[in-house]
Each structure stands twice: as C-alpha cells, then as structure tokens.
C-alpha cells in the first residue's frame, strides 16, 4: 500500500504506524460495507452496510485529521464527529470541501461496536453513505 497522499513524511515513525493502522481499519470497514452492498438488494443487511460505511468514512477522515494535527488530535476518534473533522481537513485539501456530507442521515460520528444506532433502512441511502467513504478514500490515496 502506497503512503496515502504522499504528505506527512515529517512525522515520527510511531505516528506513521498509527496513521497506517487507522487507514488499515478504514480499508477493512470499507470492504465490509462494499461486500454487503454487492449482495442482491433483498439480501443486503442494511444495518451492517450502514455501520461499516459510516465507520470507513470516519476512519478516512480521522486519518487526515491526525495527519494534519487537528485540534484535539490526541482525543479518542469517538469524540470527533465526521463534520468536525471534515471542516478542519477541508482547510488543507479543497477536494474535501467539495464533498457534500449533508446527505448523511445519521449522527455523523464513529460507530462503536456495541452502540445502538440509528441506521438507514434504505439501500439508496446506505449506498450514498458508502459513496462518501469512497470519495474520501480517493482523496486519501491521491
């Protein structure tokens, strides 16, 4: 896997390891969401697709947020919302500014494994959220 976005080479080896771990988790979540949405629409488990799409998006943004040393970057990723991170990261990458996060129908935060969460019960809405994660993924790897 190539270093995402080619920036951040001034960071310590520990920070690079942490960033790579965040990115690895984003990839796992993205793949899980994608696999779920590849099923026939009658077989899609919407909770799973929604859960993993939102987690992937959160991790891709958290990767960028940590990379650019966002305020509170030492906080738990669960304390930061997608919108907080997107607004901060857009200052460093105008492509993020062009992403319309308003189509999300959830709390716009990371999903904890044991969290009871509102989730989209419509394939089109979940697909839209996965598309947001995919747009962020492309930016990270560009």
Image: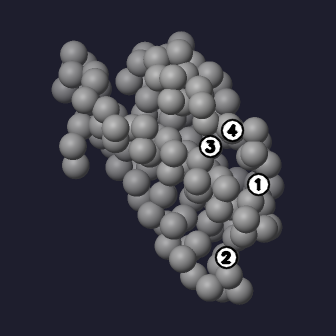
In the picture, measured across the screen, residue 77 lies left or right of residue 82, that is left
Residue 104 point in image, percent of width and height: 74, 46
| Mark toward the viewer: 3 or 2 | 2
Q: CA distance from mark 4 to mark 1?
A: 18 Å
Sort mark 2 into few (<14), some (14-19) or many (20+) by Cα contacts within 10 Å: some
Location of residue 122 by image quarter: bottom right
Mark 3 or mark 1: whose residue is earlier in sequence: 3
First in residue order: circle 4 vs circle 2: 2
Q: Can you tell which of label 2 and label 1 is closer to the viewer? A: 2
How far apart, in angstroms, are the residues tagged by discs 2 and 1?
15 Å
Q: Compared to 8, does 48 lie above or below?
A: below
Q: Which mark is residue 101?
A: 4
Name the residue beneath numbered marker 3: 110
Please give the residue where the numbered disc 2 appears in the rendered image.
45
Q: CA distance from mark 3 to mark 2?
A: 19 Å
- Location of the C terminus by quadrant is top left
Kindly identify the residue that appears in the image at 50 percent across and 41 percent down.
136
Label 1 sits on residue? 117
């Amino acid at each position: 896997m190539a270093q995402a976005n080619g920036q951040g080479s001034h960071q310590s080896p520990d920070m690079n390891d942490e960033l790579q771990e965040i990115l690895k988790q984003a990839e796992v979540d993205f793949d899980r969401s994608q696999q779920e949405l590849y099923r026939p629409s009658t077989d899609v488990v919407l909770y799973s697709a929604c859960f993993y799409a939102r987690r992937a998006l959160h991790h891709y943004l958290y990767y960028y947020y940590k990379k650019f040393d966002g305020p509170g970057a030492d906080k738990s990723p669960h304390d930061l919302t997608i919108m907080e991170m997107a607004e901060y990261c857009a200052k460093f990458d105008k492509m993020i500014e062009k992403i319309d996060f308003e189509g999300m129908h959830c709390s716009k935060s990371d999903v904890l494994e044991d969290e009871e969460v509102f989730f989209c019960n419509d394939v089109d809405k979940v697909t839209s959220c996965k598309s947001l994660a995919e747009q962020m993924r492309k930016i990270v790897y560009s």
